[in-house]
Image (cartoon, rainbow, N blue to C red):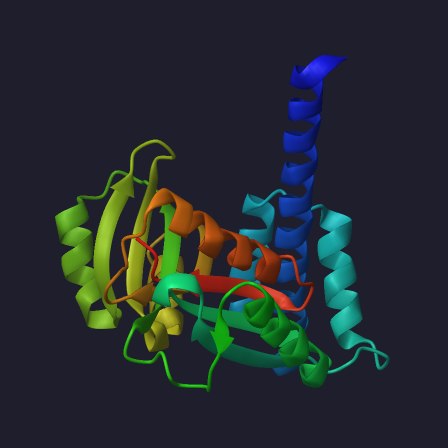
Amino acid sequence: MGRAYEYRKARMFKRWDKMAKTFTRIGKDIVLAVKSGTADPNTNSRLRVLLQTARAANMPKDTIERAIKRATSKDQEDYKEMVYEGYGPHGVAILVESTTDNPTRTVANVRSYFNKLGGSLGTMGMLDFIFERKCIFKVKNNGKDLEELEFELIDVGGEEVFLDEEANLINIYGDFAAFGNLQHYFEENGFEIVEADFERIPNDTKTLSEEEAAEVEKLIEKIEDDDDVQRVFHNMG
């Protein structure tokens, strides 16, 4: 078979792993949305947009239905959303969002990753000055003038609008607290929401050498592999 086959196989498994991780993350978000609202997307706006995100990620319908059913089950453990903050190698700020049914296990695991790979876990809030929390929407391009759209979105918390020409999607960044208002605007004005999520945007970035960046990436990949971890953000340029 040779090296080419092994390389393709490795890439294939990595892609499958990434898809599985994405499905797990969205599934947990669905569980939290249902538990904090209802299992009916018509009356639960957060669930409604998560289902759109799940479809955009090609998440199987039965996997989505299982997540909703799991959320309404009495046997479902309560998830807690926990945030862990620290510094990786070369002073790179790393913020970890997790959804876990066992915070003691999760914090122990995350701390061990930092310690073993040249970083240190800190205290909650220590990176507030580095990261700003934003919401992001990706909607189908319906031909509307982007400057006009950006002007209209100012009133509902939109901050930045740009076109992803390759995907033909309009990307909109807004204040974290504006998520509901932005979703309502898009739904009321006939925009098809393809994906919606939250991001942590660094105010400044660190530029590293290739070798230094590889050390940080090793830590980030280790953290991301943890089943309790939902998202990892950093300020590496």
Q: Quadrant of the N terminus?
A: top right
* Left or right relative to 74: residue 92: left
* Left or right relative to 58: residue 197: left
Q: Is residue 112 visible?
A: yes
Quarter-of-image position of residue 150: bottom left
Relative vertical location of residue 18 with respect to residue 234 in this rendering, above or below: above
At a point 27% along the width and 60% down the height, the residue shown is 205
Q: Is residue 42 visible?
A: no
As drawn, the residue found furthest toward the right would be: 75
Question: In the image shown, does 117 or 10 lie closer to the viewer?
Answer: 117
Residue 229: give x, y in percent of width and height.
61, 66
Residue 25: give x, y in percent of width and height.
62, 60
Relative vertical location of residue 38 with respect to residue 236 in this rendering, above or below: below
At a point 71% along the width and 27% down the height, the residue shown is 9
Report how many numbered discs are placed on residues in the image. 0
At a point 20% along the width and 53% down the height, the residue shown is 149
Residue 92: give x, y in percent of width and height.
37, 64
Quarter-of-image position of residue 60: top right
* Left or right relative to 104: residue 115: left
As drawn, the residue found furthest toward the top would be: 1
At a point 36% along the width and 58% down the height, the residue shown is 186
Relative vertical location of residue 148 with respect to residue 106 in this rendering, above or below: above
Residue 35: give x, y in percent of width and height.
67, 79
